[in-house]
Amino acid sequence: MNFDQILSDIGGFGKYQKTLYIWICLPQVLLAFHMMVSIFTGATPPHSCRDNSSSAAGNESSSPGSLSLNFSLSDSSCFSSSDVLLQVNRTERVSCGHGWVYSKETFQSTTVTEWDLVCDRAGLNSLGSSIYMSGLLVGSVVFGAMADRYGRRFVLLLSIALQTVFGVAAAFAPNFPAYVILRFVVGTTISGVIMNAFVLGTEWTCTKRRMLAGIITDYAFGLGYMLLPGIAYLIRDWRKLQLAISAPGFLLIFYIWVLPQSARWLLANDRREEAIELLRKAALVNGRILPPAVQIEKCDIFGRDKQSHSAVDLVRTPQIRKRAIILFYIWFVNVLVYYGLSLGVSRLGTNLYLTQFVFGLVEIPARSLVLFVLPCSRRLSQSSFLAVGGLACLLMLAVPADHPSVLSGLAMVGKFGITASFSVIYVYTAEIFPTVLRQTGIGVSSMFARMGGMLAPIINMLDDHTSTIPLVILGTTPLLGAVLALALPETADRPLPDTVEDAENWDMRSSPVKNNPEMSDETSRSASSPEEQELCHLASQS
């Protein structure tokens, strides 16, 4: 009897697991807040050079409409108006020597207006976003290792606590470097929450329901994505907005008492008494009966392959190496395009709040569609959704800038495709890598994804020079991924590979599971009879 069979006995997705997913989903809403808040807190409003006669009362405009004449002048936001008007007779232009005046029509204050991150300092804004994204990369390494040693529950609680404390501290940052450092720490905790919430949920869920359960957490992220524009619309000051999205984390203090540890992790670390107690509690909540403790002691929890594996094994053999490289690239592209479109929403020329809400709303049908098409084909689904995302970005090149509605519509189509592709790649990666390399493969894939997130703000910064290059990058890279995805094996209705040899000999393995009813039902049944228990015990001894 393996652990999945034990889960089936106690209820693989019963009341206990559904309650657990409620606790897992709540932090996902806050994650969306932190991931997307820079669209509002780091927005660059219309601005103009402050005249010598302007008061030194701060970087503000008492009459935003009065700036419209200056905004119509070329380079008026970075050079004094007199220099711009006389530039025909002058070979040298002087940058704003007395600061800037910012429109308050949309934002009361942002990090840009507070620390003058415009003109020759505009790159610092994108650099801050890239440093934040690099925090996700660091967090995936640090909190991933900590979770294996100290448990999913402890690291999840620690990540939520640090995210809340440093998120609130960012609202009181005295200067831009301090703000970037605090946001970097918040970024590391994002990975800690994402990974450990996902793993904790899947380790408590039976095999058949894991895909559905995983997408449920994606819906929670989409909900936070849609709520954020409404909160930002009501709170136009960046410090108050940063405080508003961070402080609710203190309400999750009750997780100390309601969040369970992973029974699978406890068994892996020889803490069987605690695991049995948790399994007994889950069985009681689900109205089931836990198998006798002696059966749990004897069962083969993690398979018979005790050989240790490392990330080097991902490139050691030819077939796994080919698939790993393709998957790493697809992960990189998914995050690059996802955040490239999401963070570039302010450049579309439409209502920022409404567009951002629709960008979040489009995630719901995208992830819902995945539930219907994924059982048919993983490979074709992955390739098709990548192609949709890439083609939509390339079509934006043919639309004039004075048609913002059309540009926004194509951007939403691209967001739809890349969001659906994002949902597919999680499942596809877990099914392609063999069991002995699955966790390692997903971890390395996540690192490549974070690299894409780090580059997304920098690519958007290129839009200041030309809008063509970012769209070409965001369009061609997923199209290449769509072609490469066709070289991956189909995993729908196929038994998952357990060893490196299984993965290497994929084409020579058994036919799809749908042609083998006994195998398709294997994960949902447990060895309930004494004969089956004895066979399981004998098999584990052999």
Image (spheres, grey):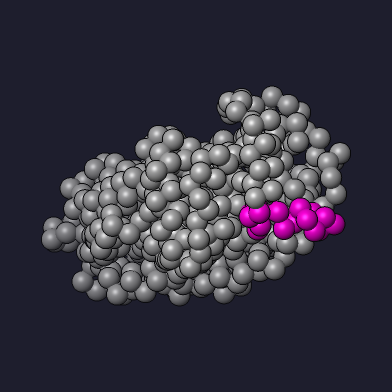
In this rendering, the answer to whether 150 lies above or below 125 is: above
Horizontally, is 69 left or right of 521 in the view?
left
What residue occupies the far front of the structure in this picture? 530
Horizontally, is 396 left or right of 261 in the view?
right
Coordinates of residue 139 in the picture (x, y in percent): 40, 40
223 falls in the magenta region:
no
Q: Who is closer to the viewer here, 428 or 240?
A: 428
Coordinates of residue 321 in the picture (x, y in percent): 71, 31
Task: Tell me which segment is drawn in magenta.
Answer: 513-529
In this rendering, the answer to whether 160 lies above or below 40 is: above
In this rendering, the answer to whether 443 lies above or below 456 is: above
Coordinates of residue 317 in the picture (x, y in percent): 73, 26
Coordinates of residue 286 in the picture (x, y in percent): 48, 66
Say which residue appears at 66% left-offset and 54% top-offset. Answer: 529
Say which residue appears at 85% left-offset and 49% top-offset. Answer: 511
Q: Name the quadrant containing residue 54.
A: bottom left
Say which residue appears at 21% left-offset and 46% top-offset. Answer: 175
For the C terminus, the quadrant is top right
Q: Who is closer to the viewer here, 49 or 424?
A: 424
526 falls in the magenta region:
yes
